[in-house]
Image: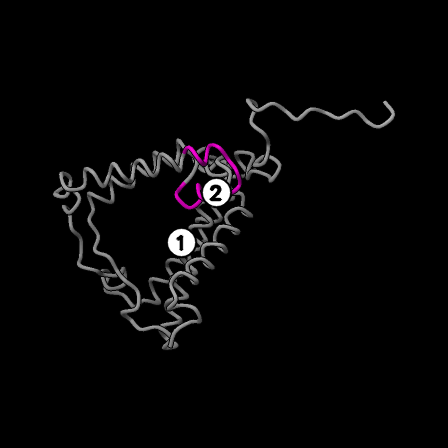
């Protein structure tokens, strides 16, 4: 059993991308202001969205497996390489903090006509090419620190899957609560007007005189 248009690849990917892009823009993630506010602890929307996505996906996959819609081997589980994850996480985190975008949100910002998103996207492409160029010399480092072979967290901990899911939901709820408290302490979260405010460096549009004046 499979979902409609699942096997077509291009159609399902395009539909998912359009929905994903619309939701990101509607949430204000097409603006670097919304994203960098996470690092100043004023707006925890990024963490809340990420936790929501993780919880919905984890619970959804679990229920689909119980219902027999998908098999246990339907989801690819990669093997963890700790040194590569630490180095890659530090680099992408630094780029996120400086540029205010991630790959997905930069595409949304670019579609919205934001110049900073264009610069970020160009840098992302250049960085990808540079990584491909140095991949072979760094392959030893990249493949070092190998973790358990294709294991899920329940398998690693030796716990039932539902126990890990319950713990994940509780942890997400606590993170949501703590994030909201910190937001209020720092005058956040950002409003739609703040997200869409023009930069000080941009000239304001000329005011048109009222008719008859």
Residue 144, disc: none
Residue sitting nearer the eye, 49 or 197: 197
Q: Nearer the viewer, residue 49 or 195?
A: 195
Q: At x 75% / y 26%, what residue is drawn?
A: 208
Q: Residue at x 20, y 46 (%)?
A: 82
* In-image side of 136 versus 111 (left or right): left
Quarter holding the C terminus is: top right
**What is the quadrant of residue 62 in the picture?**
bottom left
x and y percent of residue 159 in the render?
27, 65
Report which residue position mark 1 lands on: 171
Answer left or right for 21 relative to 192: left
For numbered disc 1, what is the local secondary structure?
Answer: helix
**Circle 2 is placed at which residue position?**
44
Image coords of residue 189 (percent x, y): 55, 39
Query: How far is mark 2 from mark 1, CA to CA?
Result: 15 Å
- From what the image shows, is residue 129 above or below residue 206? below
Upstream in the sequence, badge 2 or badge 1?
2
Q: Are marks 2 and 1 in contact (CB under 8 Å)?
A: no
Which residue corresponds to the image point at 14% horizontal and 43% vertical from the top-left?
139
* Viewport quadrant of the N terminus: bottom left
Image spot of residue 138 (x, y percent) = 15, 39
Quarter-of-image position of residue 93? top left
Which range is magenta?
A: 102-119
Name the residue nearer the viewer: 181 or 15.
15
């Amino acid at each position: 059993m499979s979902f409609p248009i699942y096997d077509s690849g291009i159609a399902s990917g395009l539909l998912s991308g359009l929905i994903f892009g619309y939701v990101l823009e509607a949430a204000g993630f097409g603006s670097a202001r919304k994203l960098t506010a996470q690092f100043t602890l004023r707006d925890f929307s990024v963490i809340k969205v990420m936790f929501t996505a993780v919880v919905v996906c984890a619970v959804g996959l679990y229920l689909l497996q119980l219902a027999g819609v998908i098999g246990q081997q339907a989801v690819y589980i990669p093997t963890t390489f700790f040194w590569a994850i630490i180095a890659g996480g530090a680099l992408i985190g630094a780029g996120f903090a400086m540029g205010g975008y991630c790959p997905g949100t930069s595409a949304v910002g670019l579609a919205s006509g934001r110049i900073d998103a264009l610069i970020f996207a160009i840098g992302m492409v250049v960085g990808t090419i540079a990584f491909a160029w140095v991949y072979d010399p760094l392959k030893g480092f990249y493949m070092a620190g190998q973790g358990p072979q294709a294991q899920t967290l329940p398998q690693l901990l030796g716990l039932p899957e539902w126990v890990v899911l319950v713990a994940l939901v509780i942890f997400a709820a606590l993170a949501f609560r703590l994030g909201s408290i910190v937001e209020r302490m720092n005058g956040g979260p950002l409003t739609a007007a703040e997200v869409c405010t023009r930069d000080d460096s941009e000239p304001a549009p000329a005011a048109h005189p009222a008719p008859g004046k």
